[in-house]
Amino acid sequence: MKEQIISEIIRQMLPYLDNAQLEHLLETLQHCLWSVEVIEKPEGAVQRNTETNEELLTMFLSAKRVEGCSEKTLRYYETSLQKMFSQVDSHVTHMTTDALRNYLSEYQQKSQCSKSNIDNIRRILSSFFAWLEDENYIMKSPVLTISHLYFVRLADMLH
């Protein structure tokens, strides 16, 4: 059973890692799971549900409310993140830097908004994904490498 799990993890990571990284992952999994016994759940066992994007958004807004954000700011966060959810069709734990960069780029082109507006949205995304990282829902924020300068340059090219 343990070997099947390791094989499935390696198979799913194939598109993301080169051969050396895959080999290191395999060795790491074998080492970490060496003394672990894996038992298959009986059929019909209930698996913990993962929170939906909307549930995570609600928790994020609650955290921001506790931090002292105004209701106006919270509504702006909520609206901005709901728009992103409607355009990027995946769970937040699977969103990539490229998908978010494309979303921001398309948003800027469609709405013809100002540089500061698109940077505000980028900062909201950054805050949300940093919170997800802090709360251990994701390993690393996909917004970290999206520089505000990218969108300033993009806006300059469009005008």
Image (spheres, grey):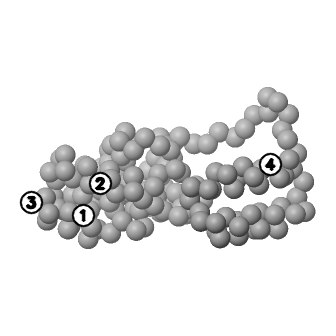
N-term mark: 2 or 1: 2
N-term mark: 1 or 4: 4
Q: Residue 10 vs residue 148: left or right?
A: right
Mark 4, residue position? 4
Q: Which is more foreground, mark 4 or mark 3?
A: 4
N-term mark: 3 or 1: 1
Query: Residue 65 lies in what quarter of the image?
Result: bottom left
Name which residue type carries label 3: His
User: Marks 2 and 4, Cα distance to the nearest angstrom?
Assistant: 40 Å
Query: Where is residue 147 drawn, in percent x and y?
Result: 32, 69
User: Marks 3 and 1, Cα distance to the nearest angstrom?
Assistant: 12 Å
Name which residue type carries label 4: Gln
User: Marks 2 and 1, Cα distance to the nearest angstrom?
Assistant: 8 Å
User: Marks 3 and 2, Cα distance to the nearest angstrom?
Assistant: 16 Å
Query: Where is residue 110 drawn, in percent x and y?
Result: 19, 46
Query: Where is residue 41 drawn, in percent x and y?
Result: 84, 38
Name which residue type carries label 1: Phe
Mark 1, residue position? 151
Residue at 47 percent of width and 43 percent of height? 90
Mark 3, residue position? 159
Mark 2, residue position? 104
